[in-house]
Amino acid sequence: MIMDFSVQKTTELFSDHAIAGAASGFITRLLCQPLDVIKIRFQLQVEPISTYHVSKYKSISQAVLLILREEGPTALWKGHVPAQLISITYGMGQFYCYNVFLKMLQRVPQIEEWHHTMHFVAGAGASCVGTIISFPFDTMRTRLVAQSNNHRVYNGILHSCNSILRQESPRVFFFGLLPTLLQIAPHTGLQFTFYEFFKGLYKRYTSDTGFYNSMLSGSAAGFIAKTIVYPFDLAKKRLQIQGFQHGRKEFGKFFQCNGLLDCLKVTIKEEGVQGLFKGLVPSQIKATITTALHFTTYEQVLLLLKMLR
């Protein structure tokens, strides 16, 4: 009976982490989707992002105003439905698996001596699971964001899913998965590691252990982690639009590549090393805000669920 009760409590605990993760993903995505749209538009543009060049998008403010003028306010939430499906499934899988992996690692003898490594490994493993289950939604979202109004290929998530299956192949849903895993595993591992580090640092100098600690620690963790792994994020987006030239006619030169290494090689050859960091600023802004919201919302929802039990 004691063992059954213990198993039940553990199951309830993990289900709370899954619910809190899903809620966190939903709220964060709803508030930060426009930053993601801007970031993707920058990543997919081959021409320089500069006011001194004939490019479609030249800066964050110019891109926002141009999208509003040409496509309307709703364009800043373009691809929002599949993006929400990504965030909910990823958030649920990530936080659930993170706590499962953490519990497993804590059974290893003397693991506490490797405190930061433990959080890194648990975070990296959890992100891989979350990414794989949510990745088809990510591909559909990227294509919906990438298409122009005058050359609309898809009329929504169901139509994009049906078109890819009918006209291309199920494999297309996982184009860009390798650079995504190469990016997301260390990225999420670093996020959790830096988050726990800054939380501990914050506690050392203040008595606050709640909301403000989560916000500040999450902001710092998101900014640092995203900057380190950014080139893989750019490569993922460019791989996801391969074969989608017909939907990109108004956005300038189409970026053509074959696989991850070729993507990085062509980017450097045509755009220089700085091309690997195209869209970095909106991405850093987004990462700072979303990571803070992600961790804070997750912990607040978790507290609420514990109070309701």
Image (cartoon, rainbow, N blue to C red):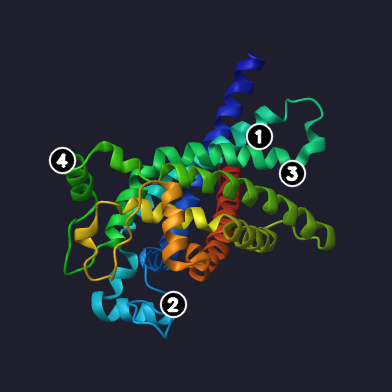
Q: Amino acid at mark 1?
A: Leu
Q: Are marks 1 and 4 in contact (CB under 8 Å)?
A: no
Q: Please state which amino acid type lies under the numbered disc 2.
A: Ile
Q: Residue at coordinates 24% horizontally, 78% vertically from top-left? A: 70
The location of residue 229, given as percent across then percent down, is 57, 54
Badge 4: residue crowd in 10 Å (few <14, some 14–19, many ≥20): few
Q: Which residue is mark 1?
A: 102
Quadrant (top left, top right, bottom left, bottom right) of the C terminus: top right
Q: CA distance from mark 2 to mark 3?
A: 35 Å
Which mark is in front, 1 or 4? 4
> Which disc number belongs to residue 166?
4
For mark 1, does the 10 Å Cα neighbourhood hold few (<14), some (14 to 19), or many (20 or more) residues? some
Query: Which quadrant holds residue 131?
Result: top left
Q: Name which of mark 2 and mark 3 comes first in the sequence.
A: 2
Instruction: Give the mark nearer the N terminus: 3 vs 4.
Output: 3
The amino acid type found where label 3 is placed reads His
Distance between the alpha carbons at the discs numbered 3 and 1: 11 Å
**Residue 87 seen by the camera:** no
Give x and y (percent) for residue 294.
Answer: 54, 55
Instruction: Decide which of tag 3 and tag 1 comes sooner along the chain.
Output: 1
